[in-house]
Each structure stands twice: as C-alpha cells, then as structure tokens.
Amino acid sequence: MVTENGYRPNITPTALVLSRPDGFSGAVLASVVLKPAREALPNTRIFLLIHKKFAPLYVNHPDLTGILTFSEESTPEEIAAHFKKQKIDALAHLEYSELVAKAAALAGVRETSAFERQCGGNAKYEILDSAAHRASHEAFHNFEVLEPFGITVAHRPLLNLSVHADACAEAFRKLEKYGIVKGMEYAVFCLDPNRLEHCVDASVFAKAAEWLNQNTKMPVVVLGDKGFSDKGFLRFCNESHGANIVDLRGETTSAETAHLLKAARLCLTGENAHAYLASAMNCPVITLFVDFSAGRWFPLGYLSTNVFTGAQRFPLEPRSFYNFRASRAFGHGKIASALEFSLALKK
C-alpha cells in the first residue's frame, strides 16, 4: 500500500467507522472485514455505516459496537451529529461517498482513508490501487483501505452477517399466501441485472425452472426488484412450462430475503447481492456470469457454483451486442448439472 505521504501508518483509533454506503451487494460484502477489524482493534469501538434498509442484516453483530444508518434524505449535518455523539476519530471509506466525507469533515474526524481514484484529495490517507487489487476479488479491496489502521487482509475472507431473527416469521407469512409453509422445499431465483447492468436472459431462468419442475416439483420463489423488466419476468413465467412460480419481487426486506434464502434448497441468480446473501446464509448458490471479468464478484463460501456464458466476444463487436448475445448463451446442460449439484449440497 502507498499512502499520500508515502509511509505505512498504524493508527489505533478510539472509535472507527467502516463506511459502505452504496448498494445491497456492497452492504453484504462489507461483512468480510468485521471479524478481522475486531481482532486487530480489540479495544476500539467499531461502527458500520450503511443505508438504513440494510441495517437488519447486522443486528447485535458480535464484532460491532453499533450500526450507523442514513437514508436518501440524510444530510451531512445529520450524519456528522452521529459521528460527534459517538466521538468518531477515524473513518475508512470502503466505498467513497461525498456525503459521508462532508459529514466527517464537519465532525472533525481526524483520520480518514479512501482509494485515491475515488476520493479526489478528500482523505488523509489516499490509497493507491495495488496490482493485486486490480486482479483480486472485490472482498480483498476493502482491506487495503483498512491497512492504515493495522487491519490486514484475511487469509480467507468470509461473509459474516447477523440477521434480525424477527424477520423470519414475517417472511414466511408472505410465502404462506402462496401455499408454501416453513419446512417445504423451494428454490429462489433472482432475475435482476448485476451491478454492471448485465442481465441474464429470461429464457435461461425459464429452462432452469422447467428442469426443477420436471425433476423435483418444488416451486420457484422469485425475489429481487419489482421495478425491473416485468416483460422479462412474464416471459420467464410463460416459458417455464407449468412450473410453480411465486412472485415476491419488491415485497421482502433485506432481512426477510436473507431468511428465505437460508431456508431455500438453492438460489439461481445473475445478480451480485442475492449471490452474496445466499452464500452468507449457507444456501447453495448458482451464479450466472455474462462476462468473464466478473470473477472479481464471485460469491464467497463453500456452497457456490459459478457458471459462465460460453460466448466469446468477436473482434470489433460492440459491447452491447456481445452482452445481448452472451446473456442467452448459457448451455442448458451446464445449468442442469449445476442445479443437480446444488440440490445435493443441501438436504
């Protein structure tokens, strides 16, 4: 790691904020640093700053002193007030945010770190991306920002959530409307695009649902964003040849989604957040990757199967054309094999 000042500080803060204010996948991925942070700083009060809708994923987390939350309406002054109340003296931007940076400045937070390419000179320690950073899994990136505080990379980073227990009952009340009660087998599909806006074609999910219907008869519960492509969802239903499809898109909180994944036999997704969350909840997950470069976003854990498209990009082919073609190029035999393997992982 190289900092703005060309040396390796080793700061022991009194109260450290780990800031991950981006999206669902980022909020889940931040969990990999919590145990290493606690082990490195046993006497430091450690807080995680995330959007309030993801806070139920970290209830009474053993490695955290507390959760700090914000919403779309939050102002720098409001966040700064929380920093002052908790006497925060250090902030690590796991994902840089101008809102959080302004709040830290207003609160007088002395020690701040962020990636140089993101912060634009607004952090005390500006971390330069290492060669390993550019080639490694995204989970390892957070540790480079934490190095000024003596937190070193975990040998094998693992997702580490503490999901609100009360959300389980509400999640299954929503499923019971469709005749699925706790203890019944079901699969979870997420048809949403990934963080790069790559979307696996609905026909790929339809073939998978058809295979499950023919071989297991278990229903498929679809989770994700209700606002995403209803046309694609309808096509998925129409091409699934009689499979039992339960649409819970947009109806579950992050904690409810976690509990539904924990009880599912498997999860099939081309989207990052549900892949990470499934892995964190020990649900076998099959992740469909349109682009080979997405290897930086593999779900972590022992129960994940990664399936890549068989399509190669042609010379001079526009990226949009390649994504369209690749999103349909998953071999049905490969998907069936992944489904069969994943079913064997959880009885």
Image (tube, rainbow, N blue to C red):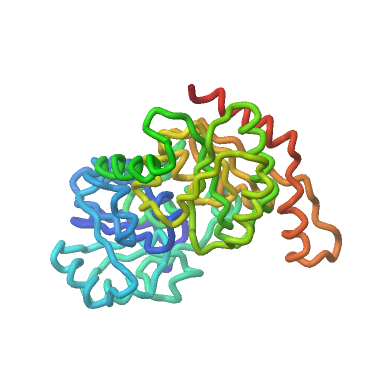
Residue with the most extreme left position: 85
Most foreground residue, 334 or 108: 334
Residue 3 x/y as whole percent: 43, 63
One can see residue 140 in this view:
no
Give the vertical position of 248 relative to 263 (above or below).
Answer: below
Instruction: Give the total number of marks visible in the rendering.
Output: 0
User: Residue at coordinates 60% horizontally, 35% vertically from top-left?
Assistant: 305
Left or right: 169 as drawn, with respect to 278: left
User: Residue at coordinates 62% horizontally, 47% vertically from top-left?
Assistant: 295
User: Residue at coordinates 59% horizontally, 27% vertically from top-left?
Assistant: 216
Residue 28 x/y as whole percent: 41, 50
Q: Quadrant of residue 335?
A: top right
Residue with the most extreme right position: 315
Give the vertical position of 300 relative to 17 (above or below).
Answer: above
Give the vertical position of 134 relative to 106 (above or below).
Answer: above
Residue 155 x/y as whole percent: 45, 37
Left or right: 32 as drawn, with respect to 274: left
Residue 55 x/y as whole percent: 29, 54
One can see residue 178 in this view:
yes
Most foreground residue, 221 or 158: 221
Q: Quadrant of residue 259?
A: top left
User: Residue at coordinates 19% horizontally, 67% vertically from top-left?
Assistant: 82
Most foreground residue, 310 or 330: 330
Most foreground residue, 316 or 108: 316
